Amino acid sequence: MTTRKTLALNPEAATAEAPALKKKGRGWEISDKRLDALHEQAREMRRHSTEAHKALAEKFAGADLGRYTFKRFAVVGSAIVDFNCHNLGLALAIDEEGQNDTLAKRRDKSLESVGIRVMRIAAKDILEDIDAVLQRLTLVMRERLAERKAAARAHKAANPNQSYDRPKTGAKPRGERKA
């Protein structure tokens, strides 16, 4: 009889601890307490929206934007943005009268450093001529979509051996297929 070869685990690897999973913060490394406070603050902001926010949210609700939807008062990292389109990496910030501009600029810089483009809109522009604001927004969305597609093409060209095919639904993994 021949001896059967088996795969043995390295005893040192078995005792080593796996890195802790980040339960909240979606990779932003924000504490649970801080993230919960941000979500509660965003909830309160949604309950007590300004007229400009309500007008823009009504337009977004009535528009057919396909997969590019905007979420009101979304928590992105450690910031709350007025509207966020996750698929485009685009955040809208509505400038109200008397808000702290230095804090807003710092927030915008931190969002742009992780690839989220911030478009600032004055609240009075929304209330006075919302159609012009929507035209500007449409142009920014098209630019952002073109940027994302160009980045995807560049990534694909730089990594020719990487497969971009999605697994077929209902297909069994390789190990379970019958020969």
Image (tube, rainbow, N blue to C red):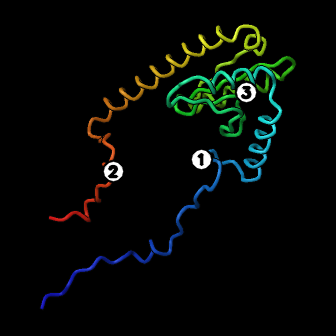
Q: Residue at x 73, y 27 (%)?
A: 106
Front of the two marks 1 and 3: 1
Which label belongs to residue 169?
Answer: 2
Q: Would you name the residue on which mark 1 appears?
A: 27
- Mark 1 and mark 2: span between their CA atoms? 28 Å
Q: Amino acid at mark 3?
A: Arg
Left or right for 29, reference 122: left
Give percent across and percent down for residue 96: 81, 19
- Front residue of this view, candidates 110 and 176: 176
In the rendered view, tell whether residue 141 sits above or below residue 76: above
- Mark 2 and mark 3: span between their CA atoms? 44 Å
Q: Given contact means CB atoms under 8 Å apart, are the residues at marks 1 and 2 in contact?
A: no
- Callout 3: SS: helix
- Front residue of this view, candidates 174 and 25: 174
Figure quadrant of the N terminus: bottom left
Which label belongs to residue 68?
Answer: none
Front of the two marks 1 and 2: 2
Q: Residue at x 29, y 59 (%)?
A: 173
Counting residues from the start of the chain, the first of labels 2 and 3 encountered is 3
Q: Amino acid at mark 1?
A: Gly
Mark 1: few/some/many CA within 10 Å (<14, 14-19, 20+): few
Left or right for 121, reference 164: right
Front of the two marks 2 and 3: 2
- Mark 1 and mark 3: span between their CA atoms? 20 Å
- Callout 2: SS: loop
Q: Quadrant of residue 89?
A: top right
